[in-house]
Image (tube, grey):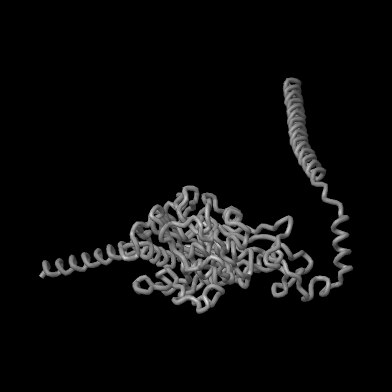
Amino acid sequence: MRLGRRKYVNIIIASICMFMAAGTVSVTAQAAKPNIISETACVIDVQSGAVLYEKNMNRKEYPASITKIMTTLVTLENCSLDEEVTYTDNAFSNWESGASNAGIKVGERINMEESLYAVMLASANEACNGVAEHVSGSIDAFVNKMNQKAKQLGCKNTHFANTNGLWKKDHYTTAYDMSLIGRAAIRNSDFKTIAGTRTYVMSKTNKNKRGKNEPLANHHKMINPADYPQYEYEYCEGGKTGYTSKSRNTLVTFAKKGDMELVCTVMKCDNSVWMEPNAYTDTTKLFNYCFEKYHKVKIADHAASEVNEQYLFTNFSPFYSKNTSSLHIDEDAGLILPKGVTIDKAEKKIEYYDNALEENGRKIIGKLSYTYKGQEVGSSNIYFEKNDSPTLKDSIDMSKWFDEAVEIANKQPLPWKKIAILIVLSVCVIGISIVCLFKIREYQKTTENRRRFKKGRRRRQRRERDFFTKC
């Protein structure tokens, strides 16, 4: 009977241990970074720029056709979509055999919008050169704009030598820099529309009266899986593929789940789409890992009032109420933190600029930023916008406010040094007085003892004299 009970207890203990071990393995697996075959990779949050995953992210590699993200971005920032591009002989120079194209002909006129669909969906190399020549007058001048834009975005290990990504020794970038470029691109609404389109039908042109026989198809299998349905990703917003024999497979992908929007770059992946694992499986792993591990905390829910209270409230009356303030931050601004970490664990910094900046017609006067474990995880511009709502001058008697201000300004400052000296002197005087008092009392006591001693001695002498006299 005892053996049976002991066996039963042992079974329970073993079960508990196995359960705890399984839980530990599960937690460890959940927290572990995914194993990918791409040699370099980087995932960043689009809104904050926080790096959520990296693998050799600053190692220089050849980008191949993901270069065309920068080509499209620079084009969108320097011309309108309805401009007409005329394709010259220069657009068809310096090609590799079998390079991607959209079947555009010399002398063909295509508007800019459709040209960019050819760039991003069909990865058309002639379209890249055509839009570059249209924007800057020459391909080389446009490439200079690409490099200038890269520096502006904070890319430190990037140099472009052409518009399309065909291999050149001095044409390189990194997974991190490419993610920075992708982050800037996806924030452009026209780019987002183009990059997220599955197929596009080209219009008739002067060289093609019937239009293209087949629609342009997005090469990115996560947005347009075609014969590879296993790679479709429900949160994918678009992206760009790349491949050359020297760069191997490269891939930039944009995905949004809930209020988190991410850009993922993987580079130098040997396996092609028909072999697994590959750039698509790597990207899917990275997105799933980041969406599971991190969450977004909206800055406006926690810090909007502090931007006003800390700097625009006086000791007399609020200059603006919280609802009518002229100071604003981005409504969708947030910081990316590991799940379970609260915003109070991040270090906050509010900075105001000496000179205001202009962006999209809005005046930027400062920046609110957060860092966590030494890395910036979220920020927002602080905007100033004129407000017609009643302010301090409308709600109180301004003359009284100015009288108070003048009175405070004219009020003599407290002479702290003099007060300190007086306090020290007073302490010294009191101390000396106490010492003197004790000395005086001691002297008086000594004197009184001497007087009593002398008086007693005289009495003894008198008694002795009287005694001998009587005898």
Say if 237 sits above or below 269 in the image: below
- At a point 67% along the width and 68% down the height, the residue shown is 328
Say if 194 sits above or below 466 in the image: below
Q: Position of residue 75 (x, y in %)?
A: 59, 64
Q: Position of residue 448 (x, y in %)?
A: 76, 32
- At a point 31% along the width and 63% down the height, the residue shown is 276
Please give left or right for residue 328 compared with residue 74 in the image. Answer: right
Residue 184 visible in the shown view: no
Say if 390 sits above or below 348 in the image: below
Q: Which quadrant: the N terminus?
A: bottom left
Q: Nearer the viewer, residue 385 or 324?
A: 385
Please give left or right for residue 300 compared with residue 386 in the image. Answer: left
Q: Position of residue 197 (x, y in %)?
A: 49, 74
**Image-quadrant location for residue 290:** bottom left
Q: Nearer the viewer, residue 445 or 243?
A: 243
Please give left or right for residue 353 compared with residue 393 in the image. Answer: left
Residue 450 visible in the shown view: yes
- At a point 51% along the width and 55% down the height, the residue shown is 177
**Image-quadrant location for residue 206:** bottom right
Q: Which quadrant: the C terminus?
A: top right
Q: Nearer the viewer, residue 466 or 382?
A: 382
Q: Nearer the viewer, residue 416 or 45?
A: 45
Q: Position of residue 435 (x, y in %)?
A: 75, 36
The tally of labels here is 0
